[in-house]
Amino acid sequence: LFQGFFEQFWPVIVMAISFVGVGLAEIFRRQGRRVLADPLESTGIFLPLLPAIGFWIGQFNPKVDYSLQLLMIGALYAIMAVRRKSFGLGLMAALSGNGALWYFLAHTDSFGLLQHPQIWFIPPALSLLAATHLNRGRLSAEQLTTLRYIAMSTIYVSSTADIFVNGVREAPWLPLVLAVLSVGGVFMGIVLRIRSFLFLGSAFLLLSIIT
């Protein structure tokens, strides 16, 4: 089967089958036909792993960019996570989405990890914040505080590191980016009544002014 058109675009074909399977599973579930819905849904969960793993085997050379593959996988897992309210599927969606971004950045010349670290670290930190907020009912107060501090510290520290790596003279807009992130964190802390957002945002806002 891995010849011609299929060899070049098989990841897209596999993902199309996954989307169709998940859609049919939802239709059958609403009709009460679980004998059809359950196997289609289970297949839809595991089938996207095939193109993700197959890329690293190296026996096939599809013309589909790996970032696009991971983005499609993340979209499918995000849809299923929302529908099933599953933390595990949400985690898979976040990993796929951030993996797509990292692979894309790794193959560019201007956005390397040591050139602009905030572009690499802020999206995963935002994913952690979103996951913490959506699952706040399952976490204790100490766990919530710890995860929020980790996520916000990652955002601010990576943005600060970007300033020191590139220098204010070469990139005078970077302190402004840190200031915008800090002010946003302060306002979120006020609206959501989260002290960690307020304290960290105020501290790094002062740091951005000093730089």
Image (cartoon, rainbow, N blue to C red):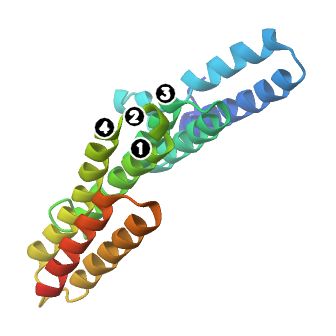
Query: Which quadrant: the C terminus?
Result: bottom left
* Residue 31 in the image, given as x and y percentages of width and height: 90, 22
At horizontal 37% and vertical 56% (from top left) the residue drawn is 123
Question: Circle 2 is placed at which residue position?
Answer: 139
Question: Circle 1 is placed at which residue position?
Answer: 132
Figure quadrant of residue 143: top left
CA gap between label 3 and label 4 equals 31 Å
Which three-letter amino acid code belongs to the residue tagged 4? Gln
Is there any visible trace of residue 4 in the rendered image? no
Is there any visible trace of residue 135 in the rendered image? yes
The label shown at residue 49 is: 3
At horizontal 77% and vertical 24% (from top left) the residue drawn is 25
Q: Pick whichever of labels 3 and 4 is earlier in the sequence.
A: 3
As drawn, is 42 to the left or to the right of 110?
right
Which three-letter amino acid code belongs to the residue tagged 2? Leu
Q: Is residue 154 above or below residue 63?
A: below
Query: Which quadrant: the N terminus?
Result: top right
Q: Pick whichever of labels 4 and 1 is earlier in the sequence.
A: 1
Is mark 4 in CB contact (under 8 Å) with mark 2? yes
Under tag 2, what secondary structure?
A: loop
Q: Nearer the viewer, mark 3 or mark 1?
A: 1
Under tag 1, what secondary structure?
A: helix
At horizontal 31% and vertical 60% (from top left) the residue drawn is 195
CA gap between label 1 and label 2 equals 8 Å
For the residue carrying disc 2, how many other residues have a C-alpha within 10 Å: few (<14), some (14-19), or many (20+)? few
Question: Circle 4 is placed at which residue position?
Answer: 143
Q: Nearer the viewer, mark 1 or mark 2?
A: 2
Q: Nearer the viewer, mark 2 or mark 3?
A: 2
At horizontal 71% and vertical 19% (from top left) the residue drawn is 40
